[in-house]
Amino acid sequence: QRSEIHSNAIAVELEMYSIVLLAKRYSIPFFGAKIVSDIVPVVPCSFEEQIEKIRSNVKATQPVIDTVWKVVRKIIQDS
């Protein structure tokens, strides 16, 4: 399946796969990025602690998300 997206694809993200195929079929430029924020803790913890860890991870990824959006906006503006 990866080669259907791009010959150099290392992985294919499940939720985005069909969107990418449709964009490719209709020659629509597409850029996708995914940041994993729900890291499973090494030490067992309660459900509430897990939710708090996920919230903390999401906050920590926000600068990365902001940077990706800046790059995407620049690519769109320049094309």
Image (cartoon, helix red, strand yellow):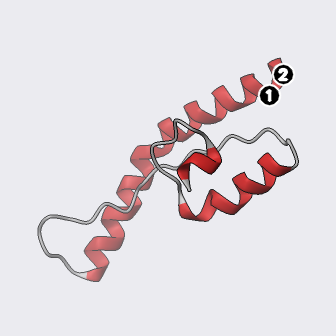
Residue 66, how many percent across, how many down?
A: 58, 36
Q: Are marks 2 and 1 in contact (CB under 8 Å)?
A: yes
- Where does residue 55 sit, x and y in percent of width and height? 40, 61
Q: Which percent across, then down, holds residue 65?
A: 55, 41
Tell me the quarter of the image containing the N terminus.
Answer: bottom right
Q: Quadrant of residue 42?
A: bottom left
Which residue bears the numbered disc 2? 79
- Near mark 2 (Cα within 10 A), the count class, few <14, some 14-19 or many ≥20, is few
Please name whichever residue, 34 or 17, is drawn nearer the observer in this view of the structure.
17
**Which residue carries the number 1 mark?**
76
Point 52% across, 41% down: residue: 9
Q: Which residue occupies the extreme left position in the image?
A: 43
Pick the quarter of the image with the C terminus: top right
Q: Is residue 56 left or right of residue 75?
A: left
- Three-letter code for the amino acid on which mark 2 is drawn: Ser
Q: Secondary structure at mark 2?
A: loop
Q: Compute the Cα span from label 2 to label 1.
A: 5 Å
Q: Residue at x 83, y 23 (%)?
A: 77
Q: Secondary structure at mark 1?
A: helix
**Dot 1, how many residues are within 10 Å of its Cα: few (below 14), some (14-19), or many (20+)?**
few
User: What residue appears at the point 74 percent right and 29 percent down from the top-left corner?
Assistant: 73
Q: Position of residue 72 (x, y in %)?
A: 69, 31
Three-letter code for the amino acid on which mark 1 is drawn: Ile
* Left or right, 48 with reference to 34: left
Residue at 36% across, 72% down: 51
